[in-house]
Image (cartoon, rainbow, N blue to C red):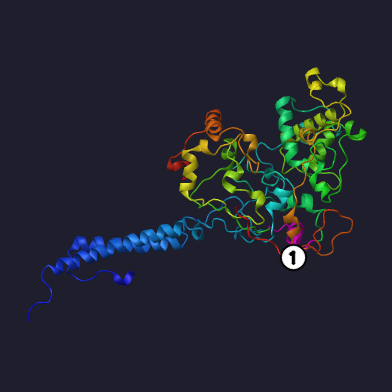
Amino acid sequence: MTGTAVTGTAVPGTRMRLISVSLLAGVALTVAGCSRLDMQDQPKYKPQRPSDFFADGRDGRPELDGTIARGQLNEDVAFYDGKDAAGKDIDAFPIAVDKAVIERGHQRYDIYCAPCHGRLGNGMGMIVQRGFKQPPSYHIERLRNAPVGHFYDVITNGYGAMLNYSQQIQVRDRWAIVAYIRVLQYSENASLNDLPLEARAKLPPANQAMSGEMKAAMGAEPMAAPDKDFMNFPAQPATPAGVPGAMGAGAATTYNAQPEKK
Amino acid sequence: MPQIFKSSTNSLARTSIILAVVALGGLGGALFELIANSSYATRQGEAREQPIPFSHAHHVGSMGIDCRYCHTGVENSQHAMVPPTKTCMNCHSQIWINSSTLEPVRDSYQTNESIRWTKVNDLPDYVYFNHSIHIKKGVGCETCHGRVDTMPLMYQEASLQMRWCLDCHRNPEKYVRPREMVTKMGYEPDEPQEVLGARLVKEYNIQKLETCWTCHR
């Protein structure tokens, strides 16, 4: 297109300029459509960008050893560590627990804990069904009698096969989760007399099987959908024996990379 | 010898040159529009290769893991965050421990080297997008990212063109949902969207931010 630029003197000055400008604009537009521009990818750091400058290749920098960021001195041992002065787990919540806190705890529990511990806290979450070591139910005697600081400590530092959740769950939310665990423990061991009269009326008759809907309403684990994708995952060699979740061996070896669009 | 061309041919020639230039410009513009809107340019719907073929369809769709289990920054910061390797290891310290597919994850965990994921939804650097405010105002993950629970490999659902952003910024009531439904995939409103949307716009105090400096700062 550039070759067609108008030369010659037959066309007077202004018109000539107009023509070249429109020609150039056409070329520029076409080129712009084909390439990304410098402003799109600026040489600046944004979260989680790679960096050539720092040795670890990250633009996000860790805190230096021995430094404390402003506002992160975390002096309140009960709140931040769940311990008393003697280093024992506290058994009183360091925050005021109200309905809002419990609801927040419910939500956070379902996000971060339910995958393994299950919605009911019985230790039968989806990841456990797929082969993760089963955690104890919250409803056993030992955990019903455990101080709240114990649960906080487990979330913060991990326990057994469970890694810590200190990076994923903020301190206040950890306490909210502990409050909700207490709710689960209470509800799973409640007797009929603990229910207000209106709630009792909604219960199914004692010797009648619960409908699926009722079970769902009571927070039972949702049925797993047929997991086609799981079967398409590349077969893994040397499947650990006795791990029910690790059933990839022998499955299709191709990975379906094309999204199924509706 | 008689002249082949009349003198009026001169102005005809000039006019046709101008017309040709205009036509060429129009053609260029049309071509530009065509290319710029194509999925080739926007990369819409293009599944991207990743160092590990992480499947959202499996983790979200089949396992039912909430978006926020991994993307912990989404409620409180501009950046949803690609999770650190540690988050993978929460489960994969015990599950699929011999899988060669997960070799890079274990390597990364042991060596503390970052996994270099390919960014899929990549806005231009002159756009200042903030996840947290959208979550707080009831914009579902699905509204922009699509049915992540059906994507074996992540792809960009939306065009991410400015007109696409503006469609919602001008008519938020068409898209917003209750806050507690934000991470739900396959969400259907209980009542007509016009009714619900109008109510939520009021309740959440959602403004129609259409100024340039809302996103370009």
Q: Indicate the position of residue A195 as horizontal and vertical percent values.
A: 82, 21
**Residue occupying the point 38% across, 59% down:** B30
| Span highlighted in magenta in the image | B99-114
Q: Position of residue B88 (x, y in %)?
A: 74, 52
Say if the magenta span includes residue B120: no
- Position of A237 with respect to A3 (left or right) is right
> Quick check: is B112 in the magenta stretch?
yes
Q: Which residue is mark 1?
A: A253
Q: Horizontal and vertical percent for residue A187? A: 83, 28
* Residue type, numbered disc 1: Thr
Name the side, left or right, on which A47 lies relative to B1: right
x and y percent of residue A232 in the render? Answer: 73, 60
Residue B116 visible in rendering: yes
Q: Is residue B216 above or below residue A58?
A: above
Q: Nearer the viewer, residue A137 or A162?
A: A137
Tell me the subunit letter for badge 1.
Answer: A
Front residue (pair B165, B86): B165
Residue closer to the observer: A14 or A65: A14
Q: Where the N terminus of chain A falls, by quadrant?
A: bottom left
Question: For residue B29, which quarter of the picture?
Answer: bottom left
Q: Residue furthest top?
A: A197
Front one among B109 and B68: B68
Please tell me how many numbered marks the rendered image carries.
Answer: 1
Query: Along the horizontal axis of the image, is A10 left or right of A107?
Result: left
Q: Is residue A75 visible?
A: no
Residue lying farthest to the front in this orientation: A208
Q: Secondary structure at mark 1?
A: loop
**Placement of A103 over or under A68, stated as above or below:** above
